[in-house]
Image (cartoon, helix red, strand yellow):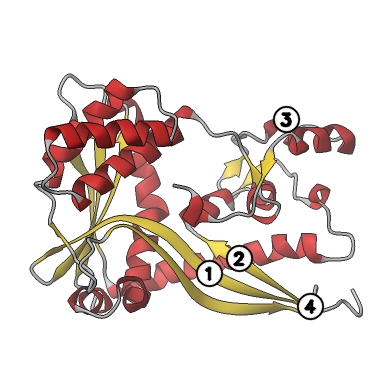
Amino acid sequence: MPNLPPKEQDIYLDNSAMSTNDCARKYQLVCCYGVRPPSNADSQFGSAAHRVMEHFVLEPSASLERKMEIVVESANKYEVNAILKLQKVAMAGDMALKKLPKVVMSQAGRPYVEIKFKVHYKDIHSPLTNTTYHIWLVGTIDYIGHDGNQVVLVDYKTYAGKMASEKLQEYALKMQLPFYSWILYKFGDRVLGPGIAAQSAALNNMRAHYYLISHNEPVPTFRLSIGHTYKDTYFEEVERVVNDHIEDMVQVWDLGNGEEGDIHQAIKNGFTREGACKYCYFKPACVTRDDVKERAFVERMARSPYDPLNFR
């Protein structure tokens, strides 16, 4: 591709992007072209539950009346109709927050809950398209506590009893907690600011826990499902996986940055990193080989630039 003008492009790397990158086609549609799949009740409920937990930490002395107001406000914000279910999550979360390690406070006096981070990782130049890609590590950490001088990284999700627990455990074990822990280990001062928490993270004096909030059991529960401690050599492996994903993502972005770049150049091979395609919300486009029909399906979906920090 001779004489291509120089370009610059931001690439946002978060846990969802790495998961989406298992399918090059889905990654291109979601992250390169900003095609937004329809929201669903589960994701909206999860966002509302996270907001409830955040405000319970920010308002530790809130009255019962105020806590119920937070539940209603969160339900309205995310258009959640299952108020009673959200109240059960609030009950479980309220009890569990008293048992979590004490939350870390920033120098400004704000608890480290729902911590949004955006860290510049590196730049990569592609001579194929004369594009410089700026790689950003982004995401939202639910809760950071401390036990003595040890940093405790916490992630929690809602789930429906035993039906979803295995799936959520698998999700957490694959990349989310290791990715967030690696971020704190490598860039803790940029995420947390100066202080003992960043110092402890840099020394790998930390552990990570994954909690599940059950909302369909007789007594709502908030239980420890997974605990992680990491060796320094493990972070080297996490970094290798991250860099592998970045290499794949740059190749997909290059498809759309050349002279003939188009949505239809996305890879459609029916396979993911882990084997045969499991399909997803883009299945109608994936199985439609006619460009006109495919474009008609994709264009019915909303579009907005991929920005993980706006997910909730």
- Mark 3 / mark 2, whichever is N-terminal: 2
- Mark 2 / mark 4, whichever is N-terminal: 2
Location of residue 165 by image quarter: top left
Marks 3 and 1, how far apart in space?
31 Å
User: In the rendered image, which residue does mark 2 sit on?
Assistant: 11
- Mark 3 / mark 1, whichever is N-terminal: 1
User: In the rendered image, which residue does mark 1 sit on?
Assistant: 136
Of helix, strand and loop, which one carries label 2?
Answer: strand
Who's the residue at 24% across and 71% down the image? 108
Of helix, strand and loop, which one carries label 4?
Answer: loop
- How many other residues sit within 10 Å of disc 1, few (<14), some (14-19) or many (≥20)? some
Q: Residue 216 in the image: x percent, y percent?
A: 26, 22
Q: Is disc 2 in contact with disc 1, using a CB cutoff of under 8 Å?
A: yes
Q: Is disc 3 in contact with disc 1, using a CB cutoff of under 8 Å?
A: no
- How many other residues sit within 10 Å of disc 4, few (<14), some (14-19) or many (≥20)? some
Of helix, strand and loop, which one carries label 3?
Answer: helix
User: In the rendered image, which residue does mark 4 sit on?
Assistant: 130
Marks 2 and 4, how far apart in space?
15 Å
Q: Is residue 283 above or below residue 312?
A: above
103 vs 36, left or right, is left
Screen quadrant of the N terminus: bottom right
Of helix, strand and loop, which one carries label 1?
Answer: strand
User: What amino acid type is highlighted by mark number 2?
Assistant: Ile
Marks 4 and 1, how far apart in space?
19 Å
- Judge depth for marks 3 and 1 and give the one in front: 1
User: What amino acid type is highlighted by mark number 4?
Assistant: Asn
Marks 2 and 1, how far apart in space?
6 Å
- Mark 4 / mark 3, whichever is N-terminal: 4
